[in-house]
Image (cartoon, rainbow, N blue to C red):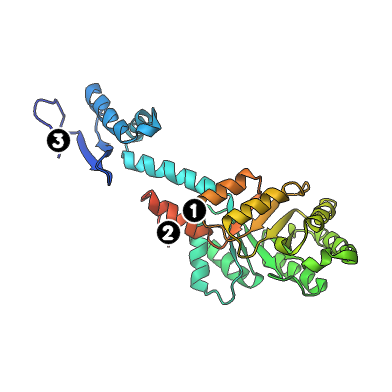
């Protein structure tokens, strides 16, 4: 029902519903109109009501109402889609990493479904999970979703021959890229020659779209600088720095130091990133990719926080 229908000239086609925020402030005026959308006086009144609830947005009050009228949808729908667009833009910078053992198929299906709804940029997993993920990707029409294999995690201490075998098997399984963990000891002393030789071999594998992963907390700054220089001269596509259980602040400080050492290749990280604030700070530090076990949980929290109804997550 409309409020203040007496002597207000409100037509039967116009209905207004006012909602309150938790603090009692007017959040929106939802309008469903027919014909020409009501007279201009009522249009201006509802715009002003809407803008009062969103003073911080300035002229967006007008824009939201006009767009809702133009598309013949509610302001809530416009708000949902605008918020969802920005959340998906953020999530496209983030990848979901799964390296735990014995992850059930139902969990992998949930991850793939949510990755599609949130537009998560990449899923990086142990090779054993590739068949299951590709099957679920087909089920949900997500064949364009980037799925990559993380090989020999966490220590990377197996023989390099077996690493190459795993890379080739991952390619046959249809992955979009591979990340091979290299042991930190290869950057110690004379072992650097071996590191250089193996990284070159890795870069030459066709269709591998290979990257090298290093445990950044186990090497010195000088060793890391050497690794960047070697990788820059190969066909390896990127460097992924693996962090242990460090805080988001420690992570930011370390990446700030890494920036003074890095070469030309994109630098990604695997870390326990759980907040939007950390994502934004790391992005500001020119991190080219953030891979975290908490990617989908982070997106789900944002959807719940802004009460977005136009997307359903599992």
Q: Which residue is mark 1?
A: 118
Q: Where is residue 41 shown, x and y percent of the image?
A: 22, 22
- Marks 2 & 1, CB-CB < 8 Å contact: yes
Residue 100: horizontal and vertical position, in percent?
59, 72
Q: Which residue is mark 3?
A: 3
Task: Report the side of 235 relative to 17 (left or right).
Answer: right
- Image quadrant of residue 101? bottom right
Q: Mark 2 or 3 closer to N-term? A: 3
Note whether 159 is above or below 249 in the view shown. Answer: below
Lower sequence index among marks 2 and 1: 1
| Residue 313 disc label | 2
Residue 72, given in percent of the width and then of the height, sits at: 32, 36
Q: Are marks 1 and 3 in contact (CB under 8 Å)?
A: no
Please, what secondary structure does the residue beneath circle 3 have?
loop
Q: Residues within 10 Å of mark 1 (few under 14, many from 20)?
A: many
Q: Give the class, few, some or many, for how many residues have Cα within 10 Å of label 3's Cα (few <14, many ≥20).
A: few
The answer to whether one can see residue 169 in this image is yes
Q: Nearer the viewer, residue 105 or 48?
A: 48
- Look at 40% across and 56% down and name the residue there: 312
Mark 1 to mark 3 CA distance (whole Å): 38 Å
């Amino acid at each position: 029902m409309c409020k203040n229908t007496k002597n207000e000239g409100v037509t039967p086609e116009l209905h207004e519903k006012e909602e309150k925020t938790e603090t009692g402030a007017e959040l929106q005026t939802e309008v469903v109109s027919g014909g020409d959308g009501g007279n201009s006086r009522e249009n201006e009144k509802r715009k002003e009501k809407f803008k009062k609830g969103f003073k911080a947005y300035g002229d967006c009050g007008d824009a939201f109402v006009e767009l809702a009228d133009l598309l013949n949808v509610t302001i809530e729908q416009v708000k949902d889609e605008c918020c969802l667009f920005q959340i998906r833009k953020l999530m496209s910078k983030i990848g979901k990493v799964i390296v735990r053992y014995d992850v059930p198929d139902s969990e992998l299906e949930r991850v793939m479904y949510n990755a599609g709804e949130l537009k998560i940029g990449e899923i990086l997993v142990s090779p054993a999970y590739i068949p299951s993920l590709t099957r679920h990707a087909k089920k949900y029409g997500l064949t364009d979703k980037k799925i990559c294999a993380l090989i020999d995690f966490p220590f990377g201490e197996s023989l390099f021959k077996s690493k190459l075998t795993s890379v080739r098997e991952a390619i046959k399984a249809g992955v979009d890229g591979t990340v091979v963990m290299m042991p930190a000891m290869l950057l110690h002393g004379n072992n650097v020659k071996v590191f250089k030789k193996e990284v070159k071999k890795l870069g030459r594998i066709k269709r591998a779209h290979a990257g090298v992963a290093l445990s950044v907390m186990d090497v010195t700054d000088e060793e890391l600088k050497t690794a960047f220089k070697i990788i820059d001269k190969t066909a390896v596509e990127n460097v992924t720095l693996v962090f242990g259980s460090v805080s988001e602040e420690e992570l930011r400080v370390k990446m700030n130091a890494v920036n003074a050492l890095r070469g030309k290749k994109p630098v990604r990280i695997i870390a326990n990133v759980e907040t939007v604030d950390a994502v934004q700070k790391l992005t500001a530090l020119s991190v080219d990719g953030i891979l975290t076990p908490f990617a989908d949980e982070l997106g789900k929290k944002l959807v719940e926080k802004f009460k977005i109804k136009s997307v359903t997550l599992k």
